[in-house]
Image (cartoon, grey):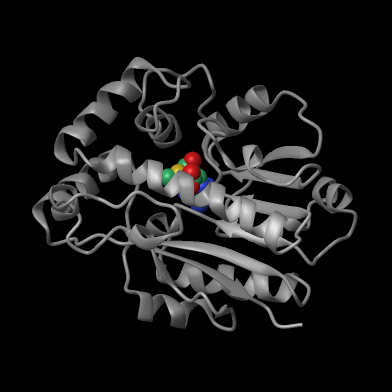
Amino acid sequence: MPTKTIVDASVPNAGRIYDYLLGGHHNFEIDRRTGDRIRATLPALPKVMRMFRWCLQDVATQLTYERGFDTIVDFASGLPTADHMHTAVAPDTKIVYSDRDSVCVEYGQEILGGTPNIVYFQADCRYPDLLLNRPEVQEFLGGKRRVAVIYWGISMFLADEEIRHIAQTLYDWTAPGSVFAFYLQLADAVDPTSSKVIEMYRQMGEELHFRSVEECKELMKPWVADAKGWVPMETWHGIEPLSPEERQQFPQGVGYGVYLVKGE
Ligand SMILES: C[S@@+](CC[C@H](N)C(=O)[O-])C[C@H]1O[C@@H](n2cnc3c(N)ncnc32)[C@H](O)[C@@H]1O
C-alpha cells in the first residue's frame, strides 16, 4: 500500500488527475500540470473519461432500478466526485467504495462525509477477498453475497493473471444471481499517441496493460456475459459518440463494457 497522504501535493496522483480531467475540483497544481500534458497529447481524453463516467452512472441505474440490486461493491473507485455512482443509484442502495490509493480513500471519506449507506475502504482490487472478508464490510453487507460488483476504468492497470485471479475469486465469493460489471479499456501500444500516454503513466509508476475482448473473455471465466454482451463504449445507451477526429486518437476504440453474470 502506498504511504503517501492527502497533504502530499508534491507528486502527481492518478486519482486526482482523473478528477481534474473530469472537471472536478479535488486536485492540486501538480495534478493539473500532468493532466494538461496528457490532454495536449490526447485532446479527446477528457471526453472519453466523461463517457466512462456516464456509463458508470448508467451501470448504477441499471443495476439498482432495472436489476434490483440493493448492494454494490465498487473496486478502484477513485474519488467519489464528478457524478460518481452514488448520485445515480436507487435510494437506500448500500455502496462499498474502495481504492488502493490512500489519497483517494482519505479524500473520498471526507467528500462523502458520513453519507448513510456508503462506506469507503482502502483495498487493493487485485485481492478482492481481502476487502470482501473484512469484518466491517461483512457487517455492512449483513452477510449478503448476492451483490453487484463493479470494476470500471481499472483493467489497464491489471496484468492478465491478476484479472484471472480477480474473476475466479469473485465467482467463488458471490452468491448465484450476482452480477460483475466490468469495463475493458483498449489502446494500441504501437500507436505513437497511445504509447506517449503509456510512457507518462510509466513515469508516475503505473504500468499499463491492454488485451482484446476475446482474450478478456477467456480471463473472465467462469463468468459469462448477459444477453447484452460486450458493448462498445461508443454505442453504450445514451452516450454522445466521438467525432471522426476524436475517433482517430483512439485507433482501437475506447473499450467495452459488460455485465457478467453468475447463474442462479
Ligand atoms: C481511472 S480511475 C477509475 C475510477 C472509477 N472506477 C471510474 O471509473 O470513474 C483508476 C483508479 O484505480 C485505482 N487503482 C489502481 N490500481 C489499483 C489497485 N491495484 N487496487 C485498487 N485501486 C487501484 C487508482 O488509484 C485510481 O483511483
Give the camera-side residue of 161 and 172.
Answer: 172
Q: Is 225 placed left or right of 89 in the picture?
A: left
Q: Residue at x 71, y 46 (%)?
A: 96
The image shows residue 190 at horizontal and vertical percentages of 12, 62
Horizontal side of residue 233 vs 144, given as left or right:
left
Depth check, front residue: 133 or 24:
24
- Image height of 72 relative to 47, above or below: below
252 on left or right of 78: left
> Which is nearer the eye, 69 or 157?
69
Q: Residue 28, position in %: x, y? A: 39, 18
> Residue 112's spot in the image, x, y percent?
68, 27
Q: Residue 200, relative to residue 61: is it above or below?
A: above
Q: Is residue 148 above or below residue 175?
A: above
- Front position in the image: 248 or 156: 248
Quadrant housing residue 25: top left
Quarter occupied by the C terminus: bottom right
Q: Residue at x 46, y 72 (%)?
A: 161
Numbered-mark total: 0
- Residue at the far left in the pictured view: 192
Determine the image quadrant of residue 143: bottom right
Quadrant of the drawing holding the N terminus: top right
Please name the residue shown 52% across and 50% down the image: 56
Tell me residue 73's x, y (percent).
68, 53
Residue found 61% across the figure and 33% down from its top? 105
